[in-house]
Amino acid sequence: VRIQGHRRERMKFAVKALSGRARAGVLQVQNPGCCVSMETPCLMLSTRKGLPHFLSPDLLSSLPSPDSHLFQVCPLHFAEGLSMQSMNNLGGLHKMLGLPEYGLGAVLRDSIICLPESSSTNKNGASFETPFGRLSIKPAEYMKMISYMKPNWAVSLPDEVPAWVTEKRNKSSVDRTILWLDDCIKSSKME
């Protein structure tokens, strides 16, 4: 879901094929100085601080192109160390990493290092276990991180719960996620 209003014109999706409710197509991402096109569905490469875990930046060109030009970036990786304001001053994550020919998608979880902690989440924001300890994040704080990182798109703040939770907790998770989506949209319009 694209939630940064001032960057909507920088991403296009064209449907090439339909099968029931599924779609296949081409995703075009416009970055400063270059346009990245990827066939969908496509693979998102998991990253640590914006770069793939398994490959140094000088070897990125050896990956199949354009199929491997989409990176999943976790904003929580940048919660410690370089300040978000510094990243913003550098021109965002694309410029900081020197990867204008890649699409960057911000997703709050990475399944390895920053995991959702459903028992500590409350109505104000989501909670995550990170290498820096437990971190709670509110929708407005998340959108500020996103505006400083300048990814091509961002996934809204979710209230993730494990499969074994009660029906009541599952329902509150859905309600919170919808509420936080509304808060993220409002925050992005104010930026």
Image (spheres, grey):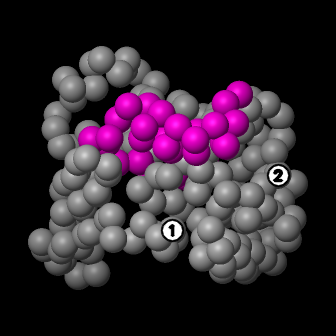
41 relative to 47, above or below? below
* Magenta stretch, residue numbers: 81-110
Label 1 neighbour load within 10 Å: few <14, some 14-19, many 20+: many
Residue 185: quarter of image: bottom right
Name which residue lies at 85% across and 67% down: 124
| Residue 1 horizontal side relative to residue 119, left or right | left
Q: Which residue is drawn at 29% across and 57% down?
A: 29
Q: Nearer the viewer, residue 36 or 121?
A: 36
Q: How crowded is mark 2: few (under 14 residues within 10 Å), some or many (20 or more)?
A: some
Location of residue 165 by image quarter = bottom right
Image location (x, y in percent) of residue 113? 64, 33
Instruction: Identify the element where label 1 is drawn.
Output: loop
Labels 1 and 2: the sequence-earlier one? 1
Residue 169, disc: none
Q: Which mark is residue 136?
A: 2
Q: Where is residue 111 in the image (x, y as percent from the top left)?
A: 58, 41
> Which residue appears at 33% of the width and 64% of the height?
10
Q: Name the residue under label 1.
A: 4
